[in-house]
Image: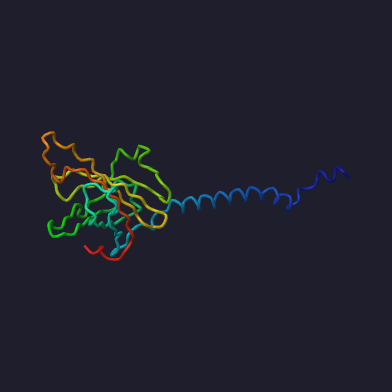
Amino acid sequence: MSRGRRGRRPRPRRVARRRAPLLLVALAGAIGAAGAAGCDDLSRFSTAEGEAYCGAITLGGAFRAGLSPRVQMRLSLDAGALDGPEPPGALSTYEAPDGTTPERRLLDGAPLRPISALAHDPLSRLEFGDGRERNAVYAVSASDPAAESMLVILSLRTDESVEVRLIRAGQAPPASGEALGPGQRQIFGVFRLTRRSGTCGF
């Protein structure tokens, strides 16, 4: 009798039991991969036609250099091109006149220019502070061709707003005491932008 039992074929139920753990592992892997892809999907930050991210500079004087509290910013963005060789968007700024100075447009549709060598450096995946899903660094050119270029740190935030830091190192003041030209002065400003319809009023 024992010999006959050993000669029997395995029951299908036992085969199913053996395969079940493998199926569970495969399913868990597929779910994990889908979740990771969803976390990396930043396409919701892209602006559609007729949309822009709009906002004003942080008013605190300690957070500004070379920019007045009247500066506003507009950003168009293709989030799918953040890591590509082409500009993923463009920046414009507008500073309203105050009676003594005319309006000023430091940036006028300036493309966010990728810095190709930066893609091979950890700085390309800059992380700082909570609430930021992705940070990226670009260069922008001022509307004045004689002015020095600037750096932009673009931060896509978890509340679906966008934060922009505009930076220019500038030149050291001359020993003669003469004032630097507008395009040579140090610049720092932080802008918090939210998506709106239209062109931000300028």
Residue 28 vs residue 149: left or right?
Answer: right
The residue sitting at 35% across, 42% down in the picture is 124
Residue 42's x, y, as percent? 40, 54
Depth check: give the residue in front, 134 or 176.
176
Residue 8 vs residue 71: left or right?
Answer: right
The residue sitting at 14% across, 36% down in the picture is 174
Residue 14 vs residue 115: left or right?
Answer: right
The answer to whether 21 is drawn above or below residue 102 in the figure is above
The answer to whether 141 is drawn above or below residue 176 in the figure is below
Residue 89's x, y, as percent? 28, 53
Residue 98's quadrant in the figure? bottom left
Residue 20's x, y, as percent? 66, 51
User: How has the structure been colored for display?
Assistant: rainbow
Residue 170's x, y, as percent? 20, 40
Q: How many marks?
A: 0
Pick out the residue farthest to the top. Answer: 175
The quarter of the image holding the C terminus is bottom left
The answer to whether 152 is drawn above or below residue 200 in the figure is above
Depth check: give the residue in front, 22 or 109.
109
The residue sitting at 20% across, 52% down in the picture is 107
The quarter of the image holding the N terminus is top right
Depth check: give the residue in front, 22 or 200.
200
Depth check: give the residue in front, 63 or 33.
63
